[in-house]
Image (tube, rainbow, N blue to C red):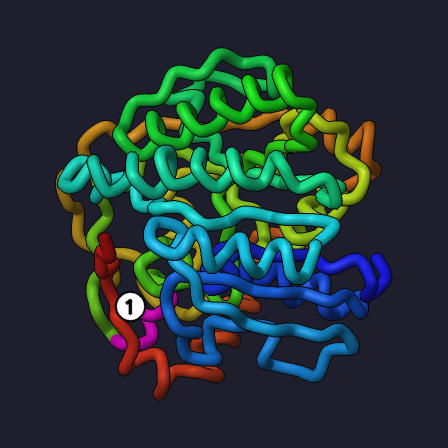
Amino acid sequence: MPQSETCLVVGSNSFSGASFADHLLAQGCAVIGCSRSPQPHPAFLPYMWAPRPGTFRFVRCDLNHDLDALMDVVHRERPAYVVNFAAQSMVAESWQNPADWFMTNLVSTVRFHERLRRCDFLRKYVHVSTPEVYGSTSGPVDETAPLDPSTPYAVSRAAADMSLRTFFAAYGFPVVFTRAANVYGPGQRLYRIVPRSVLCVALGRRLPLHGGGLSERCFIHVHDVADATARIMREGVPGEVYHVSTSRVISIRDLVKTICARMGARFEDCVEVAGERLGKDGAYRLDSGKLRAQLGWEDRISLEQGIDETIAWVGRWLDELKQQPFDYVHKA
């Protein structure tokens, strides 16, 4: 993608958004990042870790309150691609303030789409969705699986996805959807399971293991997700959904055991069993064959390699990370 083809990354302060911006910048692309909060500590912004040939500019805009300002950026810069990572993303907390999740993930997002669909210069809009829209799955599901959300978060995301389906059918809006498995890697916020586990071991704290850690997930490195998202952005077929996942399934308990072992710690000394979270789905298993067959993507980073990279990241920034919020802080 030449620099003349600008990409607007909405939600560029998010873990996946910041890593995707870094991926594009490494390819020499022009990127505009947009998030509602000021840029966080550089430990969470991979594009600040090393010089990149591309150009990056950050604009602070809140999708809920600054849509006019955001659209001014869109019309001024005329990006060929818009990739939207912005969402209220915490599942358990969505039960406490569901209206906030519906406002950001549905109402404000649909308002954005309504304005964006009128931009005839837009080549592709990538809507970063979630496998939570399927609910708990008993086996691998492909992109045709019915939506069966089980939490306020998942319902808000599924509703936005369904709205975009109508925009594609009615207006030919050039949307493509991504649904990725559990993303992890260096730069992830500390309340997520992989960095939280690493930091707990490093600081000698006990990690609460909800429900004993029996739920199962596929964990995929953020670099593999960024590569997939870029391929979908450039080559994905409008109207289509693409799953991004590995085939390896692991329980949360075994994931934490692996982290402890790679850090030379005893699992039993590092965890305590906590109650299960409301509405938590037992398993997500995504069939990513479509992405592999149609766009030539494959995951390249093993779970063990990714865990080692995350451990090294925590070690590099440990003094700074100790000063950062350890738990999720809700912003309406």
Direction bottom: furthest residue: 319
Query: Can you give x and y, in whole percent of width and height, for residue 32 in the image?
Result: 62, 65
| Helix, strand or loop status at disc 1 | helix
Q: Residue 302: give x, y in percent of width and height.
A: 64, 52
Residue at 55%, 58% (x, y): give it. 72
Q: Amino acid at mark 1?
A: Cys
Indicate the quadrant where residue 124 lies: top right
Residue density around tag 1, few if under 14, some if 14–19, many if 20 or more, within 10 Å: some
Q: Is residue 97 magenta?
A: no
Q: Position of residue 95 (x, y in %)?
A: 18, 36
| Front in this rendered view, residue 146 or 331 | 331
Q: Give the residues drawn in magenta, as a range.
A: 198-203
The residue located at (73%, 25%) in the rendering is: 290
From the viewer's perspective, is residue 134 above or below residue 99? above
User: Viewed as shown, does residue 240 lie left or right of 127?
Assistant: right
Residue 240, given in percent of the width and then of the height, sits at: 68, 24
Q: Is residue 199 magenta?
A: yes
* Identity of the residue drawn at 40% across and 38% down: 251
Looking at the rendered image, the quarter that the N terminus falls into is bottom right
Is residue 307 something that shows in the picture?
Answer: no
- Return the residue nearer the eye: 20 or 257: 20
Q: Is residue 12 left or right of residue 224?
A: left
Above or below for 242 versus 162: below
Quadrant housing residue 102: top left
Residue 132 seen in this snapshot: yes
**Disc 1 designates what residue?**
200
Q: Write down the quadrant of residue 177 in the picture.
A: top right
User: What secondary structure characterizes most of the magenta part?
Assistant: helix
Counting every numbered tag in the picture gives 1
In this rendered view, identify the residue nearer to me: 45 or 171: 171
Q: Is residue 269 left or right of residue 180?
A: left
Which residue does the image show at 29% across and 80% down from the upper left? Answer: 322
